[in-house]
Amino acid sequence: MALGTTTTTTRVAVLGGVLLFFAFVLNVSGNLVFSVNHKFKGRDKQVSLSALKEHDARRHGRLLAADAAVDLQLGGSGHPSEAGLYFAKIGIGSPPKDFHVQVDTGSDLLWVNCEACENCPTKSNLGFKLSVYDTKSSSTSNKVTCDQEFCTSTLNGRLPSCKPNMLCNYNIAYGDGSATSGYYVKDNIQLDKVTGNHQTTSTNGTVIFGCGAKQSGNLGKSPAAVDGILGFGQANASIISQLASSGKVKRQFSHCLDNVKGGGIYAIGEVVEPKVKNTTPLLPNMPHYTVSMKTIEVGGDAIELTTDIFGLFGDRKSAVIDSGTTLAYLTPEVFEPFIKKIFARQSGLKLHTVEEQFTCFEYTEKVDDGFPIVKFGFKSSASLTVYPHDYLFQLRDNVWCSGWQSNSMKSKDGKSLTLLGDLVLSNKLVLYDLENQAIGWTDYNCE
C-alpha cells in the first residue's frame, strides 16, 4: 500500500497508535500508517546467503561500536545503520516529499540525506528514485540550534561552545568505518491515518530529525541505498519518544514480519489485539534491546548453558533482539551441541558447505516434519518458539540451508555475542513496551 491510498484492507491486528504497515490486510481504528517493504523480498525467492551474512557482519560492527564509537558534537543521538532490512515510505515537509527510509530497531534517530550532501548515494537497486531533503523547499522547515531544548537535552546540558544561531549538529562514526554527519531540523512528517470506517486520510505531525550533510563508507555506496534511517531505539531523539512526549501514542511499538513474502507490519502505539502476554524484562541501561536468556531447547532436549557463554555489555547470560539482523547467531560453545541436535534425526543426510560458511543439504520432504522445534527461554518464564520453516532457507529446489550461525564476534569486554534476528522473530507479533521496559511476542500469521 502506498502513502496516500484512500482505502486499506488488512488482516493484522487491532492497534491503538501509529502504524508502519505493508502489504497487509488490517483491522484498525485511529492509527497512522506507513508502507514498509523488505529488501530481500522473502525466502520464497533465491537469495545469496553470503549477501545476508555480509549484511549482518556490517551491522554487528555497528552494534558493538554503538556506545563507544559515537561522536556527538552538539547533540546527535541514535546509531544509523545502512544495513537495515526493512524500509518505509514517508512524507516530509510542506509540500510533502516522499522519502524511503530504513526501519531499524538498532538505532534511534530519524535522518534523511539533504541537499548538497557529500558522498550521498544517487541511485538504488530497490526500485525507487532516491530523494534529498531541502530546507529551502519546505515552508515549515526550521533548523534546530544548539541552545534549544532538544539539543541541550541530548547533551545533558548546553555546550560551552554554543553561540546564537549555531546549528545542533550530529556526527556518528561506526566500527566498520562508515559515518554520517549533519544537523537537526524540525518539520512536518506526513502519515496516513486509518479511521474507524477503515478509510485512510493524510495527517501531519511535527518531528525533529537529522539532515544528513555527509556520508562515508557503506552509507554512501551501498547498491541497496535508501534516503535515510527511521530508528526505533529508546533515546529521546527517536520518533517514538517524540510522539509519546506529545501525548499522541504510548511509548510502545511492535512488528509482525513475514519471512516468506517479505511483508509485515510496524506499529507505534498500543497493541489492542491480539494481546501479548508472553513478555520478559529488558535489561536496564543497554544501548540495544537486550534480554536475559535462561534456556535453549532443541526438540525438547535442553542445551547445557554455563554462566560464561552468553554476554553483552556486562550481563553474563544476555541476548540482543534485533529485527535488522537477518540470521541468528549463537556463541561457539552453544552452537556446536545445538547444531548437532538440529540434524540428529537426519543421520543419513549429506551435509555440505555453501559459500564457505553455510551448512546445506538436499531434502524433498516437509522440513517441519523432519527437523526439531527450537525454544528459547527467558526471564519471567517467557519462551520463544522457532519452527524449522523459520530457521531453514530454501536455496533452490530441494536444497535447504541452516540460518543458525556460530558467532565469533565479541563485545568490547571480550564476551561472546548472542544475537537473535529476523530468523527467530518472523511470523510473530513482537511488542517493545518501552513504558514498562519489557519485550514480548505471540505467534501470528504475518503473511
Image (spheres, rainbow, N blue to C red):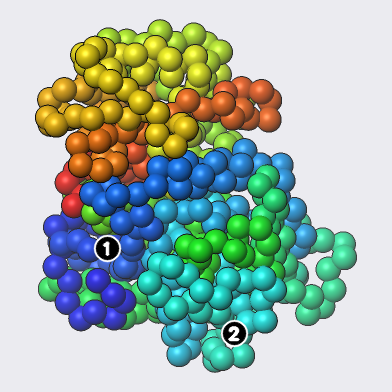
Q: Nearer the viewer, residue 439 or 135?
A: 135
Question: Depth check: 263 or 121 in front?
Answer: 121
Kind of residue at badge 1: Phe
Residue 108 in percent (x, y) is at 54, 54
Is residue 12 visible in this depiction of the protein? yes
Question: Which quadrant is home to the N terminus?
Answer: bottom left
Give the x, y percent position of residue 16: 27, 58
Q: Which residue is mark 2?
A: 134
Foreground residue among 366 and 101: 366
> Which class describes the residues within 10 Å of circle 2: few (<14), some (14-19), or many (20+)?
some
Q: Which residue is mark 1?
A: 22
Sequence order check, earlier mark of 1 and 2:
1
Secondary structure of the residue carrying numbered label 2 = loop
Give the side of residue 137 with respect to residue 23, left or right. right
- Residue 292 sits above or below residue 208 on the image: above
Residue 107 is labelled as: none
- How far across and down, in percent of the image, does residue 412 sit? 68, 30
Q: Which residue sits at x=62%, y=38%?
A: 64
Where is residue 122 drawn, in percent x and y?
56, 75
Q: Amino acid at mark 2?
A: Asp
**Relative height, residue 143 to residue 162 (above, below):** below
Mark 1, Cα crowd under 10 Å, few <14 / some 14-19 / many 20+, is: many
